[in-house]
Amino acid sequence: MSEFRKHGRKLVKCAVRLTHKEFGEIVTETRDISETGVFVSCADLVSFVAIGERIQAKLYADCDSVSETHLEVVRLSDEGVGLAFI
């Protein structure tokens, strides 16, 4: 698999609260972030979502600021879920 990406990834671990109709609410953490999305480390999440589904999220930064956003599932893997900002 090619590792070519339009936007570079930065390894960032921050708490994220995800809300979805199938699993309710879950708190986990990001593995990396880019200009266009995040990868969330949570292997169990893969069984509850599908590519194209939308998830509401709150990202918590180190300085206790909260950023609310909506994300779309774009990648599923054994380690977690790739989500694009929409």
Image: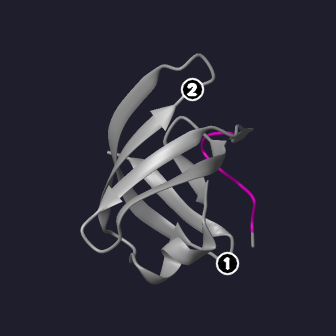
At a point 61% along the width and 49% down the height, the residue shown is 29
Secondary element at image label 1: loop
> What range is drawn magenta here?
2-8
The amino acid on which the numbered mark 2 sits, given as a three-letter code, is Ala
Extreme residue toward the bottom, this view: 47
Front label number (1 vs 2): 2
| Rendered view: 78 above or below 5 | below
At a point 57% along the width and 26% down the height, the residue shown is 61
Residue 63, position in %: x, y? 59, 16
Secondary element at image label 2: loop
User: Is there a contact, CB below 8 Å, between mark 1 and mark 2?
Assistant: no
Colour setup of the view = one colour
Figure quadrant of the N terminus: bottom right
At a point 55% along the width and 65% down the height, the residue shown is 81
**Within the image, what quadrant is residue 10 found in?**
top right
Q: Residues under labels 1 and 2: Cα distance?
A: 25 Å
Is residue 53 located in the magenta-colored stretch of the structure? no
- Disc 2: which residue: 61
| Rendered view: 51 above or below 72 | below
In the rendering, which numbered label is found on residue 22? none
The amino acid on which the numbered mark 1 sits, given as a three-letter code, is Asp
Is 45 on the left-hand or right-hand side of 34?
left
Q: 57 or 25: which is nearer to us? A: 25
Is 29 on the left-hand or right-hand side of 48?
right
Figure quadrant of the C terminus: top left
Is 46 on the left-hand or right-hand side of 33?
left
Q: 74 or 1: which is nearer to us? A: 74
**Within the image, what quadrant is residue 58 found in?**
top left
In the rendering, which numbered label is found on residue 78? 1
Residue 36, position in %: x, y? 49, 41
Mark 2 packing: few (<14 Cα in 10 Å), some, or many (20+)? some
* Circle nearer the N terminus (1, 2): 2
